[in-house]
Image (spheres, rainbow, N blue to C red):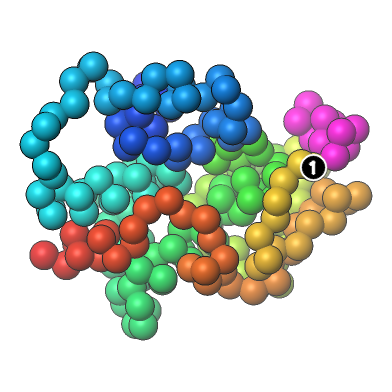
């Protein structure tokens, strides 16, 4: 299955805002959006986007932020609709409880890409059992930590020596000594810092 392998900063420039794809670098003057806040290709259309175009842009922001393929994203949205209630809030919750996102939120990875790689390589464990599927959903009460192999990873050693520098959301707790995190509750849309309009995405798929 193909995956985008181009520059992450190009996606931010196309979206016109920071998608935080490179972690802490995005908050520094090195951020490409700070240096070159223009659409890739050097051309910005004067034509206003249609309502459909704006909805598509919001969908792309969400997909690119969490690093999800279109097929995966559509499946996730279908599940959000099936659950009942507000589809946009359900969608955000399903995105947030992905294992790779939780690893990122706990500060074990500086970006979601790095967190996804940690999971795929078997460096992360849930309730003491090795987990290697980035899209796996965590549940309330789950304890996310490092697998036996993960404790040998240089990143784990760095976190032990320097500590975890992350603002952990209220639905998670972090044990900085043992480098484990616990899911205290399911996240709500008000507890996330998403930079896209979930309602626009619902409207996009509802047509």
Residue furthest out toward the front:
46
The residue wearing badge 1 is 164
Q: Could you tell me which quadrant the C terminus lies in?
A: bottom left
Give neighbour class at mark 1: few <14, some 14-19, many 20+ (Cα, 10 Å).
some
Residue 2 higher or lower than 54, as above or below: above
Asked whether 2 or 94 is in front, the reply is: 94
- Percent of width and height locating residue 59: 28, 51
Is 15 rendered above or below residue 168? above
Residue plotted at (84% across, 56% down): 175
Q: Is residue 140 magenta?
A: no
Q: Is residue 162 above or below residue 195?
A: above
Q: Which residues are magenta?
A: 151-163
Q: Is residue 148 visible?
A: yes
- Say which residue appears at 36% left-offset and 83% top-offset: 85
Q: Residue 167 or 85: which is nearer the viewer?
A: 167
Residue 197: x and y, percent? 34, 58
**Residue 11 vs residue 102, the one in the foreground:** 11
From the viewer's perspective, is 128 left or right of 5?
A: right
Image coords of residue 146 (percent x, y): 76, 46
Taking the spot 33% from the left edge, 53% from the top edge, the residue there is: 73
On the picture, is 79 further left or further right than 98? Answer: left
Query: Seen in the image, is 11 located left or right of residue 52?
Result: right
């Amino acid at each position: 299955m193909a995956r985008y392998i181009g520059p992450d900063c190009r996606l931010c420039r196309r979206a016109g805002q920071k998608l935080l794809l490179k972690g802490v670098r995005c908050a520094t003057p090195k951020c490409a959006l700070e240096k070159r806040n223009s659409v890739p290709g050097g051309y910005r259309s004067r034509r206003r986007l249609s309502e459909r175009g704006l909805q598509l842009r919001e969908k792309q922001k969400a997909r690119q932020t969490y690093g999800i393929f279109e097929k995966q994203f559509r499946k996730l949205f279908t599940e959000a609709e099936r659950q009942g209630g507000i589809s946009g809030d359900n969608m955000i919750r399903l995105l947030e409880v992905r294992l790779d996102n939780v690893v990122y939120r706990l500060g074990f990875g500086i970006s979601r890409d790095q967190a996804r790689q940690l999971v795929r390589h078997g460096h992360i464990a849930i309730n003491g059992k090795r987990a290697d599927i980035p899209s796996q959903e965590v549940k309330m009460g789950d304890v996310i930590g490092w697998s036996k192999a993960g404790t040998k990873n240089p990143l784990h050693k760095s976190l032990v020596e320097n500590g975890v520098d992350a603002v952990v959301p209220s639905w998670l707790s972090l044990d900085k000594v043992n480098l484990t995190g616990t899911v205290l509750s399911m996240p709500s849309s008000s507890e996330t810092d998403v930079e896209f309009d979930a309602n626009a995405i619902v409207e996009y798929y509802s047509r």
